[in-house]
Image (spheres, rainbow, N blue to C red):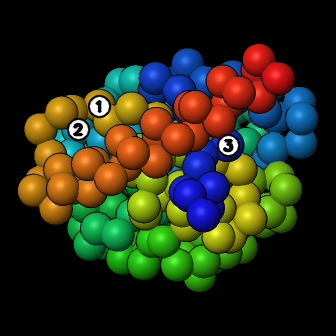
Amino acid sequence: MLKQFYPGRCAASAYGLPYGDFYSRGIRGVIFDIDNTLVPHGAPADDRARALFKELQEMGMNTCLMSNNKEPRVASFAGEVGSGYLFKAGKPRRRGYEEAMKQMGTARQATLFVGDQIFTDIYGANRAGIKSILVKPIDPKEEIQIVLKRIPERMVLWFYKRGRQKVARG
């Protein structure tokens, strides 16, 4: 039952992921959450974010920012990094993920999602049938509704890691 919430992979950060390897394996588009995935909540794009998007664009990767936030926040960040975007995306509904793929011109098997929350980001990517990477939140200071979601997230991650350890030993 919990497997619907399991990420395809966990990573410390959206920065430093092997995007070149993903590209060589057929990934042509990456959908990113913004807040606490790329920058602290509400922060503008920084040099690291701009450099990441430039690197992805130079390798031929399409990108789309996908957020449940309002347009001014998302459009501003997208303009700073030169990416397509979706605001008020309705994560974890499939519709937003499908719209992001349509914007990028990618199929499910050629798309990757990177985000910091299980019950919105990862669950939605899984529902849409795309690969997902769960990254650690950048900033531990979060809004109360997110702090409350982190409690059951820890349980899901415990079962996820336990299952992966059994497979590795098996």
> Residue drawn 77% across and 28% down?
167
| Tag 1 near tag 2, CB within 8 Å | yes
Q: Which residue is labeled 3 in the image?
A: 8
Q: Which residue is labeled 2 in the image?
A: 40
Mark 3 Cα shell of 10 Å, populated few (<14), some (14-19), many (≥20): some
Q: Which residue is labeled 1 in the image?
A: 138
Distance, label 1 to label 2, CA atoms, is 6 Å
Distance, label 3 to label 2, CA atoms, is 23 Å
Q: Is residue 111 left or right of residue 146?
A: right
Q: What amino acid type should be assigned to the residue bearing mark 2?
A: Pro
Q: In the image, residue 74 lies at what x, y percent? A: 33, 61
Is 43 placed above or below 85 here? above
| Tag 3 near tag 2, CB within 8 Å | no
> Residue drawn 40% across and 24% down?
48
In which quadrant will I find the N terminus?
bottom right
Label 3 vs label 1, nearer the camera: 3
Between discs 3 and 1, the one toward the N terminus: 3
Mark 2 Cα shell of 10 Å, populated few (<14), some (14-19), many (≥20): some
| Tag 3 near tag 1, CB within 8 Å | no
Mark 3 lies on a secondary structure that is: loop
Mark 2 lies on a secondary structure that is: loop
Label 3 vs label 2, nearer the camera: 3
> Residue drawn 67% across and 43% down?
8
Can the viewer see residue 127? yes
> Residue drawn 89% across and 30% down?
24
Q: What amino acid type should be assigned to the residue bearing mark 1?
A: Ile
Between discs 3 and 2, the one toward the N terminus: 3
